[in-house]
Image: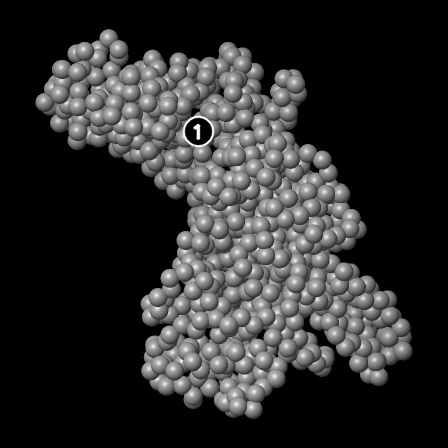
Amino acid sequence: MAKKQQLGYKEIEERLKTFKDNATSADEIGFGLLYAFGKGERDIERYKEGKGILKNFDGLLIKGLFCYKSVPELHLQETLEQLKNDTQVLKALPKIIAVSDGKTLLAYDLREKDTYENKVERLYCDFAFFYPLMDVERVHYIEENPADVKAAEKLAKLHDELRAYNEFNSEADLHDLNIFITRLLFCFFAEDTGIFEENLFSASIRQFTKPDGSDLSEYLDAAFNVMDCSLRNSETLSIIKQFPYVNGGLFAKHIQIPKMGAKARKIIIECGELDWKDINPDIFGSMIQAVVNPEVRANQGMHYTSVPNIMNVINPLFLDELREEYKKLDEQQKQLQSELDLGALNHKDYYKACAPIEKRCKQLLLRISKMKFFDPACGSGNFLIITYKSLRLLEMDVLNIMRKCKQAQELNFIDSSCITLNQFYGIELLDFPHEVAMLSLWLAEHQMNRKFHDNFGVNTRALPLHNITQIVCGNACRIDWNTVCPHTAEEEVFVFGNPPYLGSKLQSKEQKEDISFVFHGIKNSKILDYIANWFYLGSQYIKDSKAKFAFVSTNSICQGEQVAVLWTQILKETEEILFAHTSFKWSNNAKNNAGVTVVIIGVGNKTTQSKFLFNEKQKISAENISPYLSVGSRSIVQKQIQSPKGLPKMSFGCMPYDKGYLLLNNVEYEDLIKQYPDDSKFIRRIYGSEEYINDIRRFCFWIEDNELEEALKNPVISNRIEKTRDYRLQSVDESGRKLALRPYQFREHPVLNQCIIIPRVSSERREYIPMGLLDAGTVISDSAFAVYDAPIWLFGILTSKMHMTWVKTVGGRLETRYRYSAQLCYNTFPFPTIREEKKKQIEEAAENILVTRAFYPEKTLAELYDPYKMPEDLREAHATLDDIVDSCYPGYPFANDEARLECLFKLYEKITKKKD
């Protein structure tokens, strides 16, 4: 049987469009779905001949894959329910069950227990449900706990009220405020989890303080002070003495308690009414974003990471592997239990057969107990907390297997957890989140000890707290990580986190110095995002060891020129990318949070094991993952100054450097031409990316040296030139001041011949960057690129899918939008060597695209290249060009963009080797 193809989503979309464009009988839809998701035409023919499918079934039934049946109208739901319970179908275990009457399709995923319904003609718009037909796993994402969000909002509301009611004139005042709220949070948690008597804290506020809140500050001051005293004075009030000794450093410092009124007291009481026992201690991370000074937060690059995103890091880094081992042991024990229940085993043989399982359970727990977990940008401890809790839950699952393997007299086999807080390490720059991280870990420990007691009857004393010393306050860019979390080559150490991002233009002087310190002697390191420090230091830390690291990051470190600077250093020796999540946007449960476009990248020393690339819907196995987060070659594209041999130069457009004085909008242009019609010769149409894509009319003055005297006779032009001169003279840049010598011209003043225009930025939604040909005399601004005197066949190659595949991979991004680069996208592109006949074919196909666009004069290029509105004839014109350009490359025809990229990287490696 022919092997099923792994298709890209575009290929699937095109195949499913057959249902839209052509009437398809209900009997054929099942075969059409299989073809759309990778089955070959020969496979489909064999199925129609009755080969490879289960006999005696009224429909299409492929074992382990697919069940389909055509049914009369109005019987879809009834038939689907019958198939879901059909003995023959359930025995065959298809991944998808589907029924259709030719107009509507209903489907059911047996594994996910999920249902799908859509019009047949609309399948091409929504087909992710059917990816299991290509053996692509569905990726599960953990949901947020809404209680966390509610608690964070309450604390933020309290913080805002206290800021409004008090004057905080210094950082020390704000620091005291933050500690005050942290202590409140501890007390809310303590009274709901058995550390304090139930409702001790909130009930005492309600009972012993005035409704107007006038004495609340004094009461809380006394309560907090007594929680730092192990010995109580006989003169201490009983309503204060009732609070236990806490220690742990939480109440050690005397702070200024803010003044409070009735509103603040009410909010505190409302906070106490929440059920805090099930709230994640990582609520502290959300609280920090609500309470610390927003300016400080922005400068330090704090980004609180939500629980689902943390799991997306730690699951593939280590937790999936541990859980997989647990699942194997669990299945083996359940099989023995089943044999015991059925009488196939007696109790003696059962316990004997369980002994190897119990031994492996002990080995798994011993392995976990020796692991170390290190977050070198830990903030309030989110990653460490969630990791700790996940491991404790796994430990309890493993212990539960061991309990089932033991006889009644052996059930008291455990007296404590094998996982301790001593296994968790961190570095945090700021003192407040550093303190919160330590407290958060302790609260997580208490939560898990309660669960441990509920499951195994093991009691652990809650108070007093014990300081956690392996969370260090300092600059992770300057500290030797081995002094914080020392490790040997054989120890399993997992480094993870969500370090501060901060692009080069947003970095403070100190942060730029950190970059220089970490990347000392490495060329062009000034362009790197601040987070690159953690990737480089992580690479040094795990070198030649079993340690691994994975960080959440902005996607820019895997795009454009940063790739060559950073990843050349990381991947040059023994390390490789083990897994990655491609770009996705997230927001978290912090107050006033903002969505951020990120990637997740895991790195370790080279291994023969499969690597995994995740996106929001799929998990793809690969031998290699490139630093561009694509499957295949690990080659890194270095920017090139020179144009490809034999091809014209691609240049930046012309920079006005004029504060707008040399530019005219459409109204200004019309007014000027109306008043001075003879001076239109000094004005040209100007295009940048936005003007070209959205057909915005903008103009500029374009004056040659020999025309200056005549142009200055126009008072409007003369005034604009003089203002431009003044602006340039005020420049702090010497080259800018020199431009004041010719204030009537842009910084660049080329001969305006016919040219190709390439927008520098374009939406990632578009399949193609809208490029074009402009007539001689048109000015291109510096927000676009220009190739002057270019042949039309070159335009054809640049606007092809082959070139777009290269641009999407090696070019930069602005957030998720394409950002074209001449030195990275054009100068490095592996152009094919083509004969004149092929150039002619490309030229004709490119001209056809331009002609087809001209059929829609009322539409902008933004509208023409909208993926949902693109005219079919324009789409077909591009497809024709794509096919011709593809045919110039070895490996044609290409199944998808991944195949194109593989070809391009092979050619790039060949070209660069020749240059070397």
Is residue 160 left or right of 813 when viewed as pictured?
left
- Residue 414: image location, x then y, percent: 78, 76
- Residue 578: image location, x then y, percent: 67, 45
The answer to whether 850 is drawn above or below residue 560 in the figure is above
For the question of whether residue 712 can be seen, the reply is yes
For the question of whether residue 899 can be seen, the reply is no
Q: Amino acid at mark 1?
A: His
Residue 97 location, quadrant: bottom right
The answer to whether 729 is drawn above or below residue 496 in the figure is above
- Nearest the eye: 907 or 711: 711
- Residue 498: image location, x then y, percent: 56, 52
Dot 1 alpha-carbon crowd within 10 angstroms: few under 14, some 14 to 19, many 20 or more: many
In the image, what residue occupies the spot 79% across and 72% down? 402
In the image, what residue occupies the spot 44% across and 82% down? 219
Q: To which residue does mark 1 refer?
A: 878
Image quarter (top left, top right, bottom left or bottom right) of the N terminus: top right
- Nearest the eye: 713 or 722: 722
- Residue 37: image location, x then y, percent: 57, 45
In the image, what residue occupies the spot 55% across and 54% down? 429
Q: Residue furthest top?
A: 706
- Nearest the eye: 735 or 270: 735
